[in-house]
């Protein structure tokens, strides 16, 4: 187990190195620091001195990958690539590109907590609601209820999540005035702000997930051990909950696990719609301000979290299915 | 003669239409493929969706022929030197010229004859706050308060009749064609179709066509004198914007999925066939790509595209061309970042197939690696490619809306569902609420996505027999 996790972590580091290289290439070679400076200063008052000053302030005034003016290992280390990579891997993200924004590391740390508060309930509610709905449909398979349920799922998954948000906000905040339209507060008050986005997010994905889980359950139901269980004289409820649910957990973990990175990143759209100051809203702000340093850092943080959650999923497998032996 | 403008996405869409025709011909020649496709069309929801999607495709094609119209020779210009309009139009724009030109000053409700906001106007020397008459909506009515409802009904009824007649003619043609092919009398054929006795449920086709034509007829009849879906903040017709958005959705749905195919297919088959270090390298690349949360990667790429376009403003003559290149590059970005899923699937399938006897026989006969992959492996994984492609189509249309909301979608000057929803967000919080742009975007988007989903389900069920077991069906006797 430990050997397996170590190996996975090492592979994760390898993947992160690749991610770092790709993002660096994208942000510094496809467009040079000069382009970025020109865009950030903006307008017609761009002069070469201003560009130099801008680059110097952010440490972008060195060669990209290879410094010819230095000796020995400095040729490699006194470059933008080396400095950026080291700062990312040591989680010291440095300052943002735009003037107004402050230290990225500080922002990420404080916003992460907000994102988790929103995303963790979403994640749990979603898995529970979708599993329950799918189980209901499977229990009543070959009846009209199942048919109606699947039609409903297809309808629901054809509706963009943005529609759910707009209608939900209009209905619950403006017409019924049950919860505030948007915003965020600390302490227990937070529940009032988070309950609507959590419910809407789970609803928006219910169609997709429930249909998928239903197929997984049906696949399990066709297997021999289910027939054996029924032949033993077990009741349908016991078969469903003790046998089928337990076995269908593995594909469900895979499917839900793919969503786990977003737990940390926060659902971008939901955060920005409901004015919740999490990581997702941070990314959207950065995009509209065209702050490349933030976007670059978030790509790195995002893949770091994704890799971490994939390792978590693999560990969850062993819990769900003792037959799975890691190694 | 107008000057035709070839936009990148236009060319791609037309090439795609050609490819579709070529594929249809290919399917007709292959008995097993055409049998499977017949299974797709035997599914009533899939068939109805196909009709709806075809209608959207025709609209997209009409909106994919762009030109700059010739300006009438102005005084003082040299004769012989043609001057062209600075605006790029499409065939659809030209067909809807009246609607495009009938701009109001700001919001107006669907089918309204007065504006949505009150203005101060002078009546008999007194200043009064009242909603002004619209410049175009219902402008032909002399006494709108009494005539309006009657006029609406008359026009709608006329449109309905016209639409029904057109649908009737089309259905008649369809039946005549079917009867000719089957060598039966058209009366017998019509009865068979009506009672649903044909192998492919043509009745569903007819009903869907009738529905489309009835709605279309009413809309067309009302369109020339009213704003059917009202107008937006700048007074532009909402219906026109929605129709334009369909093209954007279609372009993204098709081009972006197609852009994933080359990488996914080539790398997926290679990884599965060669195994070893090739497999390791390819797996590394797609694991890396899929470990970056998709939306962040797309955002990063699109930002770079934006910087590139800002740096080269001289490449584009008109704003439309610039927006179009941005759309094209967005599709490319979506393709380059979204191939990991299909690649993984194809790799797994190829790993299974390469151990089968027919592949081993081929390699024992000395068939080269490349030939084995192209001739023996590719045709046997092609169905996976098709299923994923049609499934992705609807997902990408939904994704476009989110991307536009985040700010990395299509150009703001281009009509798209995402852009409309983005505006609707503020409009829904106005008082009184402006609901019609939202409703229009919702209706059309759900219609397109639902059709795409149902069609995709039909394709999946036909090409992947395992999926068919999960179809909900009602049986009388409960299985034991």
Image (spheres, coloured by chain):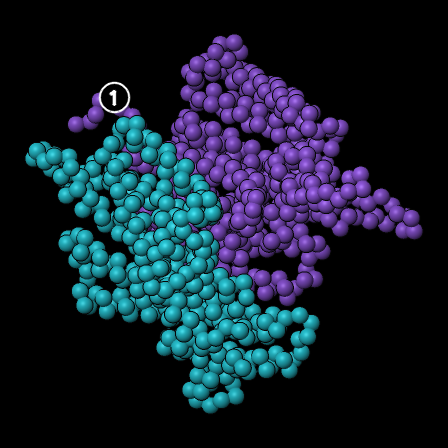
What tint does the image give chain A?
cyan
Q: Which residue is drawn at 40% across and 41% down?
A: A157
Q: Nearer the viewer, residue A323 or A217?
A: A217
Name the residue at the front extreme.
Answer: B126
For label 1, the SS is loop
Quadrant location of the C terminus of chain A in the rendered image:
bottom left
Chain assignment, label 1: B
Q: Nearer the viewer, residue A266 or A15?
A: A266
Residue A322: x %, y % from top left: 14, 54
Name the residue at the bottom extreme.
Answer: A71
Task: Indicate left or right for B27 with A196 as reference.
Answer: right
Residue A301: x %, y % from top left: 39, 67
Q: Residue at x 34, y 35 (%)?
A: A150
In the image, residue A307 above or below residue B370: below
Q: Residue at x 56, y 46 (%)?
A: B431
Task: Indicate left or right for A110 with A39 as reference.
Answer: left
In the image, residue B349 above or below residue B465: below
Whether residue A138 is visible here, answered yes or no, is: yes
Name the residue at the right extreme.
Answer: B76
Quadrant location of the N terminus of chain A in the rendered image:
bottom left
Whether residue B66 is visible here, answered yes or no, is: no
Q: Can you tell which quarter of the image residue A237 is in?
A: top left
Q: Can you tell which quarter of the image residue A326 is in?
A: bottom left
**Residue that label 1 marks:** B476
Task: Indicate left or right for B388 with B431 as reference.
Answer: left
Residue A232: x %, y % from top left: 7, 35
In the image, residue B306 above or below residue B8: below
Name the residue at the left extreme.
Answer: A232
Q: Which chain is tinted purple? A: B
Q: Nearer the viewer, residue A212 or B461?
A: A212
């Amino acid at each position: 187990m430990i050997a397996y996790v170590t190996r996975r972590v090492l592979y994760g580091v390898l993947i992160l190195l690749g991610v770092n290289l790709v993002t660096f290439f994208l942000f510094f070679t496809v467009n040079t620091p000069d382009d970025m400076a020109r865009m950030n200063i903006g307008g017609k008052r761009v002069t070469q001195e201003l560009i130099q000053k801008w680059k110097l302030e952010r440490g972008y005034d060195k060669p990209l990958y290879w410094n010819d003016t230095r000796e020995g290992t400095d040729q490699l280390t006194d470059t933008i690539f080396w400095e950026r990579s080291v700062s990312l891997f040591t989680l010291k993200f440095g300052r943002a590109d735009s003037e107004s924004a402050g230290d990225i590391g500080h922002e990420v740390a404080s916003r992460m907590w907000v994102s988790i508060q929103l995303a963790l309930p979403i994640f749990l509610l979603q898995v529970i609601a979708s599993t329950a709905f799918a189980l209901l449909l499977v229990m009543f398979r070959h009846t009209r209820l199942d048919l109606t349920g699947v039609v409903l799922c297809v309808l629901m998954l054809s509706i963009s999540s943005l529609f759910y948000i707009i209608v939900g906000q209009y209905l619950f905040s403006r017409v019924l005035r049950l919860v505030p339209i948007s915003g965020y507060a600390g302490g227990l008050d937070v529940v009032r702000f988070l309950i609507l986005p959590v419910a809407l997010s789970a609803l928006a994905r219910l169609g997709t997930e429930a249909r998928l889980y239903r197929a997984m359950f049906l696949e399990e139901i066709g297997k021999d051990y289910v027939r054996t269980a029924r032949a033993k004289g077990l009741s349908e409820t016991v078969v469903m909950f003790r046998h089928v649910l337990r076995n269908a957990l593995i594909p469900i973990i895979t499917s839900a696990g793919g969503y786990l990175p977003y737990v940390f990143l926060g659902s971008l759209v939901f955060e920005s719609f409901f004015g919740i100051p999490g990581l997702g809203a941070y990314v959207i702000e950065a995009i509209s301000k065209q702050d490349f340093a933030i976007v670059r850092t978030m790509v790195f943080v995002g893949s770091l979290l994704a890799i971490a959650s994939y390792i978590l999923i693999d560990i969850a497998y062993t819990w769900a299915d003792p037959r799975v032996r890691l190694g | 003669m107008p000057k035709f403008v070839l936009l990148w996405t236009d060319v791609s869409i037309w090439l795609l239409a050609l490819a579709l025709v070529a594929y249809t011909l290919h399917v007709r020649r292959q008995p097993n493929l055409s049998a499977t496709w017949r299974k797709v069309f035997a599914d009533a929801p899939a068939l109805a969706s196909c009709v709806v999607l075809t209608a959207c495709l025709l609209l997209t094609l009409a909106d994919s022929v762009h030109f700059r119209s010739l300006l009438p020779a102005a005084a003082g210009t040299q004769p012989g030197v043609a001057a062209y309009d600075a605006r790029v139009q499409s065939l659809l724009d030209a067909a809807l010229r009246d609607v495009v030109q009938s701009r109001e000053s700001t919001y107006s409700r669907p089918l309204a004859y007065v504006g949505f906001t009150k203005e101060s106007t002078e009546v008999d020397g007194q200043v009064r706050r009242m909603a002004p008459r619209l410049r175009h909506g219902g402008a032909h009515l002399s006494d709108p308060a009494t005539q309006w409802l009657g006029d609406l009904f008359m026009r709608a009824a006329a449109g309905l009749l016209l639409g029904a007649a057109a649908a009737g003619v089309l259905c008649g043609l369809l039946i005549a064609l079917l009867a000719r092919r089957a060598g039966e009398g058209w009366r017998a054929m019509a009865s068979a179709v009506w009672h649903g006795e044909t192998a492919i449920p043509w009745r569903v086709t007819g009903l869907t066509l009738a529905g489309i034509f009835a709605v279309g007829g009413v809309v067309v009849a009302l369109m020339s004198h009213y704003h059917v879906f009202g107008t937006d903040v700048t007074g532009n017709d909402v219906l026109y914007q929605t129709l334009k958005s369909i093209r954007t959705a279609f372009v993204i749905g098709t081009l972006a999925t197609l852009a994933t195919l080359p990488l996914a297919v080539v790398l997926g088959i290679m990884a599965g066939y060669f195994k070893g270090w090739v497999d390791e390298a390819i797996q590394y690349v797609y694991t890396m790509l899929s470990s970056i949360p998709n939306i962040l990667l797309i955002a990063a790429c699109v930002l770079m595209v934006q910087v590139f376009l800002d740096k080269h403003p001289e490449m584009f003559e008109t704003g439309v061309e610039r927006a179009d290149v941005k759309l094209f590059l967005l599709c490319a970005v979506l393709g380059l970042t979204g191939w990991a899923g299909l690649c993984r699937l194809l790799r797994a399938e190829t790993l299974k197939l390469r151990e089968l006897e027919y592949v081993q026989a081929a390699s024992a006969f000395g068939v080269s690696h490349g030939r084995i992959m192209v001739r023996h492996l590719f045709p046997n994984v092609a169905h996976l490619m098709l299923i994923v492609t049609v499934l992705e189509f609807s997902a990408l249309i939904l994704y476009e809306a989110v991307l536009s909301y985040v700010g990395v979608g299509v150009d703001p000057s281009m009509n798209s569902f995402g852009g409309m929803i983005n505006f609707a967000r503020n409009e829904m919080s106005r008082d009184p609420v402006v609901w019609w742009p939202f409703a229009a975007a919702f209706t059309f988007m759900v219609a397109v996505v639902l059709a795409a989903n149902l069609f995709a389900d039909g394709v999946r069920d036909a090409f992947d027999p395992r999926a068919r077991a999960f179809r909900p069906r009602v049986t009388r006797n409960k299985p034991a």
